[in-house]
Image: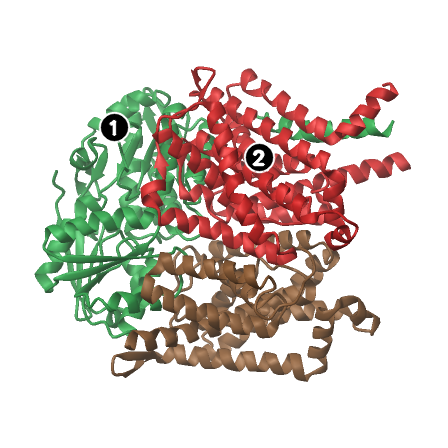
Chain colours: A red, B green, C brown
């Protein structure tokens, strides 16, 4: 490979390019197979990976966020409510499911981004709980505890995305979009984010306007979570409070930490492994939870820095030897 | 060229995972029939999911004990695959797919209203029959004809329970307490109508699921001076605490439970008959010698005690009828045919007695199994007994 | 009026329980920097150990409570020593480990004891009535034990060398170690102290409420809330906040009902943080 190409790749980021390629390739899978299990697992991965990106963006700035389900709910319910007014255009819905949570995140960010470290962790946990209660006390708008069922399929280029295959293809599309947004954000501002991650007080004193990048990250992260909510509602054809329970944020955090927080490939690897494991363990009935717990312990103990981090470190060591 | 190497690494790492998924679970060859069981098998509602699983396993063991299920001219060995759907809509949807991937077309479960909501729209896609035991307002609908309901729900029994209670106590007002999610609100709204039809004034109080101490809620409820308190569909553990704390607070009136089985557990948690004192409840399938045979058979067939009480009795007919329908239809793959046979099977369980296909009135589709059920009364700390109510349409 | 008094009594009772849980939670966080997701698991385990001692081994209830506290402390000690210790500086990894442990504890409890609530009653029952205000005897005893436990913890932390050492490590680990404090000895001890408190609370509270595999989950959320309100790592703040959370929960639930009550509590915490980002008595803390 000539030096020019290497230079370009370096500027765009190897991991980012691979991540985008993975999702481009993923479009082929629903076209190649009709296996129900693959469809199901892949669709869950496509939803999970987008939600995990939302957590991962915040992790880039050393902020652990539990608020993802709240923003997912905003995105998902936006789509479900739009569906009741017969709005099913894919482009409109995609924009709306990104914009609504992002807009809500602006004032919220002004409140919560003043907090650092574990205070931020805990307050985002509270945010997710508040969202759940807000759903319960607004039955007129959100259907309350019953949620909104019978969401119409989205319409892309005049075609209703109805079959399993179309739903999955659309989920792949949303995942690709979320990857592009996430990659663009974290790649373009990688130095700023790295400085904030390392030591935000120091970064501030060196002249970086920290709050501006934190706010930007928070808003984009909320929008990406909204896309995940859209994808989830589109998969289930239902917006239900149980889909956005605050406790599911633990899953997304687990996905990104287990995959590795150092690279954009971390969320992809972590989500794929853990969603696959969840489906595998699901058929073990009451032992499912425990097996999941054991898997978390093993990965965390065996692979420090997550799977991607460990693999990278291993290869670097081998190359050095 | 280190950068290039790193891309390779990243690519390998990412694609390896996706490739790892491409291992389809192959359906078993030969005549082996797999059925699914589904419901929450961990967390708060675990007893209901595990009861579903127990019912599926028992029905399977029954036919296996006779050499297998007769399908056409073959005898099929029946096995059960359980799925923990975690009381969520997504869990049940994922479960339907996971079971479909194992070639499973018949699911005993799920349990909760959120699960039923999640699985309904995809049963058609996956060609599966499911039996939900939820009390959701739309437990079965004409739109999703492969969903069946292990009834009756509150619409089927609430009126009978209230009428029976009014024979024993003078109740002019009642306060209902239930969780603030679908598992609570759907039942309370049906109960409220039934109470009003019987001339009883109602107030409703919802608590957040996960609440462990009900003392504040009870103080609030008692401020309205109700003649009776109904714990509706609060999980039995919660209802037990509510009963205990109501009595500690000095509430002397009758306490009701218009919301499903669990009285034994309420009795245990609350501290016994002296605490419960005056209680009326929907008792599920009546506790008859014939029903008790199920427990004895369960122990014989599965080698352990039946610990789910009447929940399992209520779930068992769904599993038995499904297997019977498969046998009559003579196919283990043609789901539409099995569903059609099922809809016309006579409702007559060896242990639970004669029932009906109900649901036409409430849901607009007669896909709800309704067997005789009991209304239990405890008065002055003594069990007066369980009155048997015959199902009617 | 009696409703107002009633809510106050309930609130103080809740507050004492929350205080024991939150003190342990903040102790682990303050000293080790670990957000302990398994805290509710230890609470639940305390209940089950006490139950097994009473129902299975025939021990007297007070003795069972002591056994429960020691058993959960021992498990906490082992968990810290074997799993947390090697990764102590990676806060995300330790968070994940405690989450994994919680999932395993719940599954083991479910597999051994089954999903249904246990028959586990407090040995003393009945309540005092004064006019229309009532006061359950069992709640009074639990409240007394909780207050004694909080007092003991206070003595240990502020009047002994061990306590001084632990607080020094919480303040500044590097300086503490330079002074010759040995984290390898003290960290597991601090963890054990905290999980023992959670176990004690479980053994005390589950018999007056209920004991089933799910009872640990709300504990975590409440501990979170209390600890944010009080200020992370601040023991005084945690105790103060626990009583505030208890009283607010009681009053809002009595006057506004369950859903709105919870919402008010959450919004209140959110607002407090806007005006006092470090909680009531907290100080600036390390990153997650």
Q: Position of residue A253 (x, y in %)?
A: 60, 45
Q: Is residue B377 left or right of residue B181?
A: left
Q: Do marks 1 and 2 share a chain?
A: no
Secondary structure at badge 1 equals loop
Q: Residues within 10 Å of mark 2 (few under 14, many from 20)?
A: many
Q: Is residue B159 left or right of residue B259?
A: left
Q: Is residue C125 above or below residue A82?
A: below
Which one is nearer the viewer's eye here, B392 or A200?
Answer: A200
Q: Position of residue B314 (x, y in %)?
A: 27, 45
Q: Position of residue A186 (x, y in %)?
A: 69, 37
Q: Is residue B74 above or below residue A206?
A: above
Q: Chain of mark 1?
A: B
Q: Residue at x 13, y 59 (%)?
A: B165
Looking at the image, can residue B210 be seen?
Answer: yes
Q: Residue at x 56, y 65 (%)?
A: C227
Report the quarter where the N terminus of chain C lies.
Answer: bottom left
Report the quarter where the C terminus of chain C lies.
Answer: bottom right
Looking at the image, can residue B102 be seen?
Answer: no
- Mark identifier at residue B330: none
Q: Position of residue A300 (x, y in %)?
A: 68, 48
Q: Is residue B182 left or right of residue C269?
A: left
Secondary structure at badge 2 equals helix
Which one is nearer the viewer's eye here, A189 or B346?
Answer: A189
- Mark identifier at residue A50: 2
Mark closer to the observer (1, 2): 2
Q: Is residue A85 left or right of residue A316?
A: left
Q: Chain of mark 2?
A: A
The span from disc 1 to disc 2 (Cα, nearest Å) is 35 Å
- Circle 1 residue: B142
Image quadrant of residue A140? top left
Image quadrant of residue B170? bottom left
Q: Residue at x 50, y 19 (%)?
A: A34
């Amino acid at each position: 490979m000539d030096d020019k190409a290497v230079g370009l790749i370096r500027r765009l980021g190897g991991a980012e390019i691979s991540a985008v390629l993975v999702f481009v390739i993923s479009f082929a899978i629903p076209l190649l197979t009709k296996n129900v299990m693959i469809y199901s697992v892949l669709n869950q991965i496509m939803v999970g990976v987008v939600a995990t990106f939302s957590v991962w963006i915040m992790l880039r700035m050393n902020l652990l966020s539990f608020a993802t389900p709240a923003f997912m709910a905003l995105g998902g319910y936006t789509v479900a409510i739009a569906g009741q007014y017969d709005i099913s255009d894919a482009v409109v819905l995609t924009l709306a499911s990104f914009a609504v949570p992002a807009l809500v995140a602006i004032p919220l960010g002004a409140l919560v981004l003043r907090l650092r470290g574990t205070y931020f962790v805990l307050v985002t946990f509270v945010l997710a709980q508040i969202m759940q209660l807000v759903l319960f006390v607004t039955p007129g708008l959100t259907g309350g505890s019953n949620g909104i069922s019978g969401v119409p399929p989205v319409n892309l280029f005049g075609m209703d995305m109805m079959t399993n295959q179309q739903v999955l293809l659309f989920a792949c599309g949303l995942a690709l979009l979320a990857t592009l947004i996430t990659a663009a954000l974290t790649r373009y501002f990688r130095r700023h984010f790295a400085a904030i991650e390392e030591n935000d007080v120091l970064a501030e004193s060196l002249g970086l306007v920290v709050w501006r990048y934190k706010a930007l990250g928070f808003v984009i992260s909320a929008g990406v979570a909204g896309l995940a909510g859209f994808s989830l509602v589109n998969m289930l054809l239902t917006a239900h409070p149980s889909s956005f329970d605050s406790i599911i944020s633990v899953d997304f955090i687990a996905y990104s930490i287990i995959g590795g927080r150092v690279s954009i490939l971390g969320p992809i690897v972590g989500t794929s492994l853990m969603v696959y494991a969840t489906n595998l363990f699901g058929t073990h009935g009451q032992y499912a939870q425990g097996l999941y717990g054991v898997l978390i312990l093993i990965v965390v103990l065996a692979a420090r820095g997550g799977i991607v981090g460990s693999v990278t470190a291993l290869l670097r060591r081998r190359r050095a030897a | 060229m280190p950068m290039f190497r790193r891309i390779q690494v990243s690519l390998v790492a990412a694609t390896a995972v996706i490739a790892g998924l491409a291992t389809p679970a192959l359906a078993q060859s030969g005549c082996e029939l797999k059925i699914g069981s589904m419901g929450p098998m961990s967390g708060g509602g675990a007893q209901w999911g595990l009861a579903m699983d127990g019912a599926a396993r028992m029905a399977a063991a029954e036919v296996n004990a006779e050499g297998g299920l007769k399908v056409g001219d073959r005898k099929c060995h029946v096995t059960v695959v359980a799925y923990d759907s975690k009381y969520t809509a997504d869990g049940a949807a994922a479960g339907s797919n996971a079971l479909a991937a194992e070639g499973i077309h018949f699911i005993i479960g799920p349990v909760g209203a959120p699960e039923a909501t999640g699985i309904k729209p995809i049963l058609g896609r996956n060609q599966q029959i499911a039996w939900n035991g939820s009390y959701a307002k739309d437990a079965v609908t004409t739109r999703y004809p492969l969903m069946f309901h292990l009834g009756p729900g509150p619409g089927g029994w609430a009126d009978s329970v209230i009428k029976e209670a009014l024979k024993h106590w003078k109740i002019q007002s009642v306060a209902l307490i239930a969780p603030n999610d679908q598992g609570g609100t759907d039942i309370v709204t049906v109960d409220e109508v039934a109470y009003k039809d019987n001339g009883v004034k109602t107030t409703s109080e919802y608590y957040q699921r996960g609440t462990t101490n009900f003392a504040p809620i009870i103080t609030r409820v008692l401020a309205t001076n109700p003649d009776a308190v109904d714990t509706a569909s609060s999980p039995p553990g919660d209802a037990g605490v509510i009963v205990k704390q109501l009595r500690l607070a000095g509430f002397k009136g009758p306490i009701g439970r218009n919301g499903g089985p669990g009285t034994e557990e309420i009795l245990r948690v609350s501290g016994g008959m002296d605490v419960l004192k005056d209680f009326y409840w929907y008792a599920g399938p009546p506790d008859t010698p014939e029903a008790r045979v199920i427990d004895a058979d369960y122990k014989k067939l599965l080698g352990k005690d039946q610990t789910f009480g009447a929940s399992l009795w209520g779930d068992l007919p769904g599993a038995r009828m499904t297997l019977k329908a498969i046998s009559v239809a003579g196919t283990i793959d043609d789901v539409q045919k099995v569903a059609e046979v099922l809809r016309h099977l006579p409702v007559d369980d060896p242990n639970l007695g004669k029932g009906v296909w109900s649901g036409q009135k409430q849901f607009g589709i007669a896909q709800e199994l309704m067997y005789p059920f009991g209304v239990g009364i405890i008065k002055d700390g003594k069990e007066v007994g369980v009155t048997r109510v015959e199902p009617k349409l | 009026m009696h409703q107002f008094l009633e809510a106050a009594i309930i609130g103080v009772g809740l507050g004492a329980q929350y205080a024991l849980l939150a003190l342990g939670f903040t102790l682990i966080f303050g000293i080790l920097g670990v957000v302990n997701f398994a805290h509710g698991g230890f609470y639940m385990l305390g209940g089950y150990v006490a139950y097994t001692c009473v129902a299975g081994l025939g021990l007297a209830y007070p003795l069972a409570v002591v056994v429960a506290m020691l058993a959960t402390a021992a498990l906490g000690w082992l968990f810290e020593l074997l799993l947390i210790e090697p990764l102590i500086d990676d806060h995300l990894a330790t968070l994940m480990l405690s989450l994994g442990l919680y999932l395993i504890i719940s599954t083991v409890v479910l597999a051994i004891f089954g999903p249904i609530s246990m028959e586990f009653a407090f040995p003393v029952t009945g309540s005092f009535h004064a006019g229309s205000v009532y006061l359950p005897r069992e709640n009074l005893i639990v409240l007394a034990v909780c207050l004694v436990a909080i007092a003991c913890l206070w003595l240990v932390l502020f009047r002994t060398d061990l306590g001084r050492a632990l607080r020094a490590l919480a303040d500044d680990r590097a300086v503490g170690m330079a002074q010759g404090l040995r984290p390898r000895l003290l960290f597991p001890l601090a963890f054990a102290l905290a999980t023992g408190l959670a176990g004690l609370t479980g053994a005390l509270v589950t018999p007056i409420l209920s004991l089933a595999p799910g009872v640990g989950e709300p504990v975590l959320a409440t501990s979170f809330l209390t600890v944010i309100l009080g200020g992370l790592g601040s023991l005084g703040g945690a105790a103060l906040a626990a009583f505030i959370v208890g009283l607010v929960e009681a009053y809002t639930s009595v006057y506004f009902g369950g859903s709105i009550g919870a919402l008010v509590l959450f919004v209140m915490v959110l607002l407090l943080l806007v005006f006092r980002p470090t909680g009531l008595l907290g100080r600036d803390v390390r990153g997650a």
